[in-house]
Amino acid sequence: MVTSIEKNQAGKPLYQAVADSILAEIQSGQLGANQRIRSESELGQLYGVGRNTVRHALAELAARGYVRTLQGVGTFVAPERVSKTAEYLMGFTQEMQLQGRQAGSEVLEAAVIRAEPFLARRLQLQLGAEVVYLLRLRLLDGQPMAIERTHLPHTLFPDLLNHDFSHMSLYQVLAERYGLRPDHAEQEIEATLATPQVAELLGLEMPAVVFVFHRETRLADGRVIEYVDSEVRADQFRFYTNLKLHAPVKEVGFRRLPGRVTAEGS
């Protein structure tokens, strides 16, 4: 192992050579997801380097999302991140099922509330109009992955809360029960630090980064049928999209949606 590092160093910093060697074990399957990596002292002896070099190598791998360190416990191979499209409007349940994953939800709150000024603007409703509010913890293979706060006009979806959304797909119910199929959406994604309440629900150690989504979902005729705020584990997802060169300016102009994610209800 030491010989391999010496041969492949080729002017690289020594910590990078150590990181590359550990990464090769991960990518080859010698080290599997959630498997504990050797201790710093063991790695130092194995590669013939000092502890600071090992720490630098592990920090490099952690920054790239290949490992995670639990203080006082050790360093583990991070599970492969789930791919999620940023291009198509698709429900969480449907998208995860297409990847062969088991999606689920835990309903934390379900109620009919009144539209305050922010929601009235987002949903194009009169101030004080009734809004269906659904707060869910989204699960993937039984593990918490996201917190989703969904708001829908009650006039369009009466009795919506009679459905059990711990097992049912919201978009499927909207299409099959109410005949209203989401057609397109405007969405903003940003990264921020999780609040203590969000970190607790998602099983994260502070400080932790989450992706925050703000989305307005519309019907084909342009009517807004949904406004969503959500936080998604940044250590578990990666996003992909197709990009076009020379798109018309009117296609790429984005109307910034004001943020509204809070710890309330978490």
Image (cartoon, rainbow, N blue to C red):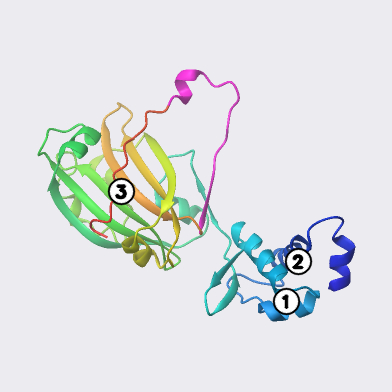
Q: Residue 219 or 173: which is nearer the viewer?
A: 219
x 69%, y 65%: residue:
57
Q: Residue 193 or 220: which is nearer the viewer?
A: 193
Residue 217 image point, x, y percent: 33, 37
Look at mark 3 in the image and give the residue it sits on: 261
Residue 222 image point, x, y percent: 30, 27
Give the image quarter of residue 244.
top right
Amino acid bearing label 3: Val
- Mark 3 vs 1, N-terminal side: 1
Q: Quadrant of the N terminus?
A: bottom right
Helix, strand or loop at label 1? It is helix
Q: Quadrant of the C terminus?
A: bottom left
Dots 1, 2 in contact, CB < 8 A: yes
* Left or right, residue 264 beside residue 87: left
> Between tags 3 and 2, which lies in front?
2
Amino acid bearing label 1: Leu
Helix, strand or loop at label 2? It is helix
* Left or right, residue 148 beside residue 110: right
Q: Residue furthest left?
A: 128
Residue 177 image point, x, y percent: 24, 46
Look at mark 2 in the image and give the residue it sits on: 18
Residue 16 image point, x, y percent: 75, 60
Q: Is residue 82 visible?
A: yes
Marks 3/1: CA–CA distance: 42 Å
Marks 3/2: CA–CA distance: 41 Å
Amino acid bearing label 2: Val
Helix, strand or loop at label 3? It is loop
- Mark 3 vs 2, N-terminal side: 2
Question: Can you tell which mark lies on residue 43?
Answer: 1
x 42%, y 68%: residue:
142
- Mark 1 vs 2, N-terminal side: 2
Any magenta on residue 146? no
